Image (cartoon, rainbow, N blue to C red):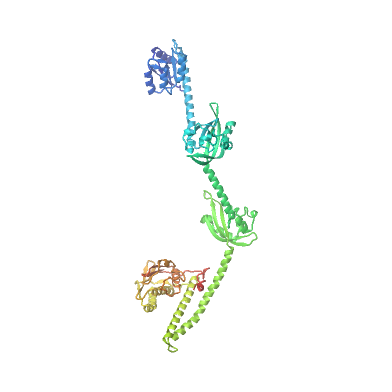
C-alpha cells in the first residue's frame, strides 16, 4: 500500500532548530515533503503560493508571532512550538485556532512526539472538513427541497427555513426566522392574543399547532396531516390546504422538529371538482330520459341507468353481467355486429329492435361508442338507447296518410282533365263563332274564361308531372338524339309566343354539336319552361337569347333575358315548389312548379342548373348536361308524395 505523504511547512527563525528538524525527518524516514520559512514574511509568501497539509511554527518570530500565522493560514491546521512560552501563551494560541501547542527543550526531544501530533492534527482537520461538507450538503438539500421545510426548537420558534417557504409566504428570512411558527407563517390567529401565536383560543384547535406539539412531546414522527389554514400573504388573507409532516431531531442536546409543508390546495380543489363532477354526471346518468349502458370487453352489461330498467322492464339482477346480445333478436344482433364500430370508427349510430323481459320487441335508436386503452385495445363500449316505437308508429300513419293524399291528388287531377277538355273545346267553338256571331262583350268574357281554363290545365299538368318526378314514377327514355333538332323544335314552338309578347327571341347553336344521349321529350320541356319564363318576365321590345355549346363532357344551354331580374335574396328559393317571387305591381300568373320540374329533370340526367340575375338588368339560366346521360334507376321514395300532399291546401 502506498505510503501517505504530508506536505509540511516549518516556520522557524532558529537555524539550529531548523537543522534538528531536517535531521529528525531524515533519521526517522518520515513521509514529509517539507519547506522551511525563516520569517513571518517568508512564511506568508509560501502560504499564499503553496498548498500545505499542516504548519509547524515557532511562536516567537523575529518579525511576528504564531498568532500572525494563525491569521494567515485560515484553512490549514497549525501546531505552535515555543521554548519561552507559558500557560497564558498556550491559551491564547488555542483560542486563536491552533490545533496543538508543544514546548521546546534544549535536546529537541519534543520532535519525537511531533509526528503523532501532526498526524492527529491532519486527521482531525480532515474529519472536520468531511463533517463540514456533509453539513453543507444537508443544508443544500434542505434549501433545494421542493416543499417548504422549517426547523423549529422546543419552544416552536423557527430557527431555519428553506427558500420554498420564503417563496410561498412572499417574505424575507428576517420576517420568518426567530418567530413562533404561527407568526412566521402569517397565520390569521397569530395576532389574536397579546402573547402571539400559540396562546389564542383558535390555537387550541389548530391541527398544525397540535401536530408539532405531539412530535415534540412524543419524539415520534407524524406524516401527511392535511390541514386547512388561512395565512396573510401580501396583506391579503389566503386560504390554503397544507399537507404537514414533522420529524423529531435533537440538536446540541435540545429537542427540535423538522417540518415539511406541501401546498396541496390545487390537488384538493381538483379532488373536490372531480367529486362534484362525478356527482353531477351520476345525477345526469341516473335521471336521463334515455337508456345509457356500459359494456365490458366481453360484451356484458356492467352499468346502466334507471331508464334502461324501465325500458326493458328488467331489474338489476336481470341485467348485471348479462350478455348484451341476449337483449336483441338474433337477426338484429347480426346487423349490429355487422356495423363493426371498432373497425369503422369509434362511434356508430343505427336503428334496431330490442326485447323486453316479456318478449315484446320495441323499436330503438342506438348510438354506440367503443372504449379503448392507450394501446388501442378495446376495453368496452357505451350505448345510448332511445325508444322510438311511438315515432315508428307515427311514421307508418303518416306514410299511410301520404299514400291516401297522393292517390287523392292524382285521382282529382286526372278526373279534372276530362271536364276541362270539354270546357276548353266548348269555349273555343263559341269564340270561333261556329255556333253564331258573338258581340264584343261576349268575346271579352269568353277570352277571360279561355285564359283561366288554360291556366288550370297548366296547373293540373304541372302537378301531375311534378308528382311523377317526385315520386320516382317517371322514367327517362334515354336515346341518342340530336341537340340541333331539339333546339329547332323548341324554336318553332316558342317563336309565335315571343312575337305575340313583342319580345325578340334568338338561338345560337355551336356548329358540329355531337349527338348525345338524353330524353328528348324531357329536355324539350326543360327548354320550353325556361324560354317561356324568360319571355313572360321580359317587357316588350326586350330580348331572349338561347345559346347551346359543348364544354368538355357537357353541353351547356344558356337562356338569358333582359327582363326584370330576380332579387338576390330570392335566388336560393326559386327552385322550390310553388315559390313565386314577390313583385309588387308586377304580379305575373304561374303555377310555381315550372323551375322545380326543370331542376328535377336536369338532376335525373346527372346535370345541374345555375342562375345569375340582377334586378332590372335580366337573368341567365345555365343548364349543364352530360353528353352521355344514363337514366338512373330511382326507387319509389318512402315520402314520394310528401311535397304534393299539401298541394290542394297550399293553392
Query: Residue at the spot x=60%, y=62% of the render?
Result: 362
Q: Tell me if residue 137 comes above or below residue 228 in the rendering.
A: above
- Residue 504 location in percent, x, y? 35, 76
Residue farthest toward the front in the current orientation of the protein: 194
The answer to whether residue 98 of the structure is visible from this angle is no
Q: Is residue 22 left or right of residue 161?
A: left
> Image quadrant of residue 496?
bottom left
Whether residue 16 can be seen here = yes
Residue situated in front as seen by the camera: 63 or 307: 63
In the image, 368 versus 99, the foreground residue is 99
- Where residue 181 appears, x then y in whole percent? 53, 34
Check the image and name the residue furthest to the bottom. Answer: 436
State left or right for residue 19 relative to residue 460: left
Residue 293 place in picture, x, y as percent = 58, 55
409 vs 36, nearest the viewer: 409
Total residue callouts: 0
Q: Note whether 473 is above or below 161 in the view shown.
A: below
Residue 199 picture quarter: top right
Amino acid at each position: 500500500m502506498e505510503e501517505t505523504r504530508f506536505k509540511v511547512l516549518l516556520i522557524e527563525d532558529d537555524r539550529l532548530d531548523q537543522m534538528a528538524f531536517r535531521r529528525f525527518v531524515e533519521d526517522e524516514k518520515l513521509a514529509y515533503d517539507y519547506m522551511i520559512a525563516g520569517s513571518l514574511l517568508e512564511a506568508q509568501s509560501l502560504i499564499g503560493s503553496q498548498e500545505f497539509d499542516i504548519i509547524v511554527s515557532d511562536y516567537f518570530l523575529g518579525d511576528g508571532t504564531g498568532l500572525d500565522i494563525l491569521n494567515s493560514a485560515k484553512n490549514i491546521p497549525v501546531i505552535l512550538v515555543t521554548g519561552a512560552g507559558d500557560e497564558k501563551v498556550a491559551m491564547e494560541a488555542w483560542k486563536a485556532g491552533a490545533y496543538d501547542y508543544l514546548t521546546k527543550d534544549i535536546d529537541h526531544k519534543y520532535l519525537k512526539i511531533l509526528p503523532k501530533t501532526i498526524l492527529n492534527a491532519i486527521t482531525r482537520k480532515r474529519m472536520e472538513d468531511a463533517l463540514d461538507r456533509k453539513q453543507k450538503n444537508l443544508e443544500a438539500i434542505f434549501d433545494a427541497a421542493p416543499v417548504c421545510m422549517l426547523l423549529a426548537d422546543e419552544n416552536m420558534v423557527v430557527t431555519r427555513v428553506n427558500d420554498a417557504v420564503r417563496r410561498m409566504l412572499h417574505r424575507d428570512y428576517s420576517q420568518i426566522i426567530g418567530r413562533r411558527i404561527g407568526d412566521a407563517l402569517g397565520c390569521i390567529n397569530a395576532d389574536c392574543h397579546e402573547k402571539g401565536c400559540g396562546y389564542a383560543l383558535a390555537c387550541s384547535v389548530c391541527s398544525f399547532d397540535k401536530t408539532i406539539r405531539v412530535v415534540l412531546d412524543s419524539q415520534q414522527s407524524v406524516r401527511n396531516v392535511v390541514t386547512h389554514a388561512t395565512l396573510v400573504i401580501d396583506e391579503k388573507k389566503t386560504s390554503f390546504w397544507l399537507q404537514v409532516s414533522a420529524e423529531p431531531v435533537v440538536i446540541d442536546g435540545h429537542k427540535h422538529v423538522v417540518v415539511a409543508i406541501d401546498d396541496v390546495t390545487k390537488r384538493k380543489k381538483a379532488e373536490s371538482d372531480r367529486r362534484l363532477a362525478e356527482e353531477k354526471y351520476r345525477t345526469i346518468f341516473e335521471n336521463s330520459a334515455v337508456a345509457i349502458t356500459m359494456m365490458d370487453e366481453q360484451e356484458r352489461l356492467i352499468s346502466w341507468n334507471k331508464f334502461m330498467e324501465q325500458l326493458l322492464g328488467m331489474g338489476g339482477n336481470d341485467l348485471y353481467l348479462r350478455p348484451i346480445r341476449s337483449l336483441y333478436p338474433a337477426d338484429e344482433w347480426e346487423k349490429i355486429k355487422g356495423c363493426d364500430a371498432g373497425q369503422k370508427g369509434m362511434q356508430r349510430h343505427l336503428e334496431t329492435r330490442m326485447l323486453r323481459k316479456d318478449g315484446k320487441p320495441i323499436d330503438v335508436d342506438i348510438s354506440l361508442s367503443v372504449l379503448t386503452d392507450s394501446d388501442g385495445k378495446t376495453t368496452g363500449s357505451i350505448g345510448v338507447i332511445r325508444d322510438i316505437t311511438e315515432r315508428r308508429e307515427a311514421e307508418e300513419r303518416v306514410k299511410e296518410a301520404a299514400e291516401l293524399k297522393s292517390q287523392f291528388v292524382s285521382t282529382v287531377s286526372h278526373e279534372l282533365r276530362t271536364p276541362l277538355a270539354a270546357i276548353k273545346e266548348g269555349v273555343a267553338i263559341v269564340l270561333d263563332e261556329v255556333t253564331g256571331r258573338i258581340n264584343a262583350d261576349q268575346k271579352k268574357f269568353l277570352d277571360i274564361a279561355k285564359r283561366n281554363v288554360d291556366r288550370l290545365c297548366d296547373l293540373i299538368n304541372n302537378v301531375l308531372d311534378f308528382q311523377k318526378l317526385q315520386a320516382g314514377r317517371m322514367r327517362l327514355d334515354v336515346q341518342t338524339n340530336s341537340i340541333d333538332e331539339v333546339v329547332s323544335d323548341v324554336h318553332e314552338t316558342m317563336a309565335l309566343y315571343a312575337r305575340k309578347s313583342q319580345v325578340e327571341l334568338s338561338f345560337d347553336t355551336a356548329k358540329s354539336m355531337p349527338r348525345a344521349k338524353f330524353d328528348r321529350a324531357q329536355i324539350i320541356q326543360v327548354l320550353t319552361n325556361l324560354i317561356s319564363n324568360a319571355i313572360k318576365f321580359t317587357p316588350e321590345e326586350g330580348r331572349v337569347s338561347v345559346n347551346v355549346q359543348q364544354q368538355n363532357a357537357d353541353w351547356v344551354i344558356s337562356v338569358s333575358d333582359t327582363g326584370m331580374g330576380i332579387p338576390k335574396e330570392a335566388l336560393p328559393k326559386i327552385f322550390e315548389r310553388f315559390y313565386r317571387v314577390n313583385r309588387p305591381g308586377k304580379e305575373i300568373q304561374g303555377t310555381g312548379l315550372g323551375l322545380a320540374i326543370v331542376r328535377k329533370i336536369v338532376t335525373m340526367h346527372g346535370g345541374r342548373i345555375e342562375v345569375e340575375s340582377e334586378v332590372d338588368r335580366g337573368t341567365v339560366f345555365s343548364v349543364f348536361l352530360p353528353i352521355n346521360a344514363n337514366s338512373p334507376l330511382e326507387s319509389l321514395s318512402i315520402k314520394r308524395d310528401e311535397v304534393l300532399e299539401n298541394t290542394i291546401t297550399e293553392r
